[in-house]
Amino acid sequence: MTQSFTLKVDHLIKQFCERGTPPCLAVEDATFSINKGEIVCIMGPSGCGKSTLLRMITGLELADAGVVTASNSTHAFSPSTAIVFQEHALFPWLTVYENVKYGLNLAVRKKSVADPHSKVMEYLSLCKVDAFADSHPYQLSGGMRQRAAIARALVVEPDILVMDEPFSSLDPRTRLELEDEILKIQNKTGTTILMVTHSPEDAVYIADRIIMLTGRPAKVKEIVPVPFARPRDIADPAFITLRLYVNRLISG
Amino acid sequence: MVRKDTISPWWGIAIPVIVIIVWEICAILINNSYILPTLQQIFPVLAHPFEDQMGCGSLAENAIISLKRVLTGFFLAVAIAVPMGLLMGRYQPVYVLFNPFFQLLRPVPPLAWMPLAIAWLQIGAGSMIFIIFLGAFFPLLLATIDGVRGVRNTWCEVAESLGATKFETFSTVVLPGALPVIWNGCRISFGIAWMCVVAAEMLPGTSAGLGFLIMYAYNLGQIQIIVAGMVIIGIIGIGVDFVFRAVDKRYLSWRALER
């Protein structure tokens, strides 16, 4: 995918209907767009419908109204996405290598892959888990598991890498380490990244733009551009100011 | 590292050894082989498993007949309970439709079906296999449903987001994810099936099998053969369970190790 594209999320609406309760509006009119190669964080108060929004973008959940499209200069297409979840999303009965291979096996149907083995190894080493290729997930630390999960998502070479709070179960040091790694990988692959996070620090550290949602039902409250050059310094006064601003936006 | 509050697995032999010693002492004191035969009476029977007993065939022959019945009933149960459980665990409408029916049948002891089984399938292998099937079916069905429900939704969503069809998600995620629990259900089911066969063979109309041999020996007052038959039943039960656990340890241990 060398052409540039824009992902458009257009007036997305989702309500949940459960037996015996009035329908509950989860996402109300979400509209924004993301450019190719951009890193965008979605933030908002907990339970505001961030995950629902992500699930609609990846097609795991159908929207009640509105559309998600990607378009380049000539035509619209449905972007391929791959997801990294919070934790415990690796298949525990497969080794790290087999986990990454799993995604590739499914992708092979759409576009043929010349040498699946070296492709798997390539992404394992890109995410620096090649040393653990033959380990099972339960033998790995939380950080290593997430690296493997990222490798599994990237190996299918998605247009958009979607991450749902991928670092929330990791300690702060591992988080920063992984975030640097993601930035490095993104530099090489040019993958568009869409990530939900709770942490203003993570968002200001990694994102080009932050999409701030309101409380339930979710609407776009504000889109915050992050103007700093990378690598960013979390102790820089301007960084801290923006972080505090983002923090205030979430809580009120 | 050896922890202080653990002991060697070899200690597991201690209690059986004590029971055997107490048994032998009691047998000598009671001195009535119709109540409690001594080891010297039981052991020769066990030492010659291929020797004909009372004109009913050897211990080994009868054990094999019982095992064949158990395996037939057990595999029938696997063939129906596992697919049924997969569907019931995964699709709510199937569960709602079938669950009350199975819950109603589940508390009925398999042997209570014997009169009907005989009426439908006549005396013999057919009705016994039916009883064994019933004994093995319900625990396996419940285990399979539980196993499917224990499959994390995120695993399925990962597969779907990578483009897996419904069937691929089922075969590559739900099935392997549920397998350890299903396997444990098979293990429990086989144990129950093994108990059912011996009980079913004790009923009138049978002419072979370990249960029959035990009943026949009872009628002829051959208590040492009864005890030898019980020992064989126990040994086969342990052996099969060992195989189940070995496979679990070798291939399905991820479930116990996953935090």
Image: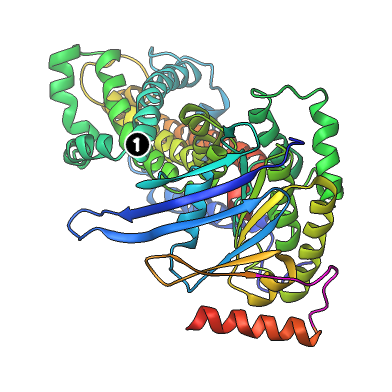
Identify the residue at horizontal 81%, vertical 22% (top origin). Answer: A114
| Main SS, magenta residues | loop
From the top left corner, tell me how far across and down residue B79 is, in percent. 40, 22
From the top left corner, tell me how far across and down residue B237 is, in percent. 48, 35
Badge 1: residue crowd in 10 Å (few <14, some 14–19, many ≥20): many
Choose top left, top right, bottom left or bottom right for residue B173.
Answer: top right
Name the chain letter of the residue that bears numbered label 1: B
A118 or B113: which is nearer to us? Answer: A118
- Left or right: residue A248 versus residue B251 is left
From the top left corner, tell me how far across and down residue A147 is, in percent. 75, 54
- Left or right: residue B129 versus residue A22 is right
User: Would you say residue A233 sits in the magenta stretch?
Assistant: yes
Identify the residue at horizontal 23%, vertical 25% (top origin). Answer: B203
User: Would you say residue B142 sits in the magenta stretch?
Assistant: no
A246 or A201: which is nearer to us? Answer: A246
- Left or right: residue B196 versus residue B114 is right
A110 or B95: which is nearer to us? Answer: A110
| Residue named by callout 1 | B141
Above or below: residue A81 compared with residue B63:
below
Mark 1 lies on a secondary structure that is: helix
A244 or A129: which is nearer to us? Answer: A244
Query: Amino acid under label 1?
Result: Leu
Identify the residue at horizontal 20%, vertical 60% (top origin). Answer: A21
What count of labels does the image hold?
1
Choose top left, top right, bottom left or bottom right for residue B7.
Answer: bottom right
Residues shaded magenta: A225-234
From the top left corner, tell me how far across and down residue A158 is, in percent. 68, 40
